[in-house]
Amino acid sequence: MNNFNKTDLHLDGLEIAGLYLEDVFSVWEHYDKNANKYFTVFMINNSRITVPATEANVALLYQGGHPVSEFVINDGVVDEIEIKTNHGVAI
């Protein structure tokens, strides 16, 4: 698939061109110390980006067809809890 057939990944809070929705590998949802929700988006080329969880970002990332997991730290150990599967079914 060439880049002409891919959907541009336009996320609020991100000014990077040349990112495509089809190149997203997974998404982690997490919170900062002030309880603000963020997404860390992992791309297939091993890069990652962090963006705020605005309404537009939530809609795009939850409906993008890739898994969304919650990033939780329990007793110093990082846990990944999948909150949406590839088929859009919450678990």
Image (spheres, grey):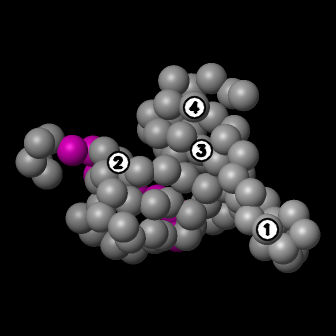
Asked if the magenta segment contains residue 8, the reply would be yes
The residue located at (74%, 57%) in the rendering is 79
The residue located at (87%, 64%) in the rendering is 74
Give the mark, 4 or 1, whose residue is nearer the N terminus: 1
Q: Element at badge 2? A: helix
Alpha-carbon distance for marks 3 and 4? Answer: 7 Å
Give the mark, 2 or 4, whose residue is nearer the N terminus: 2
Q: Element at badge 1? A: strand
**Nearest to viewer (mark 1 / mark 3):** 1
Give the mark, 1 or 2, whose residue is nearer the N terminus: 2
Query: What is the x, y in percent for residue 20?
Result: 29, 53
Query: What is the x, y in percent for residue 91?
Result: 72, 28
Give the residues drawn in magenta, as a range.
6-13
Give the mark, 3 or 2, whose residue is nearer the N terminus: 2
Asked if the magenta segment contains residue 75, the reply would be no
The residue identified by callout 1 is: 77
Alpha-carbon distance for marks 1 and 2? Answer: 30 Å
Q: Is residue 44 visible?
A: yes
The residue identified by callout 3 is: 68
The residue identified by callout 4 is: 85
Q: Element at badge 4? A: loop
Q: Please indicate whether residue 17 sits to the left or right of residue 88 in the image.
A: left
The residue located at (36%, 67%) in the rendering is 46
Alpha-carbon distance for marks 1 and 3? Answer: 19 Å
Q: Which amino acid does label 1 sit on?
A: Val
The residue identified by callout 2 is: 21
Alpha-carbon distance for marks 3 and 2? Answer: 14 Å
Tag 3 and tag 2, C-beta contact below 8 Å: no
Q: Which amino acid does label 4 sit on?
A: Thr
Q: Element at badge 3? A: strand
Q: Which amino acid does label 3 sit on?
A: Val
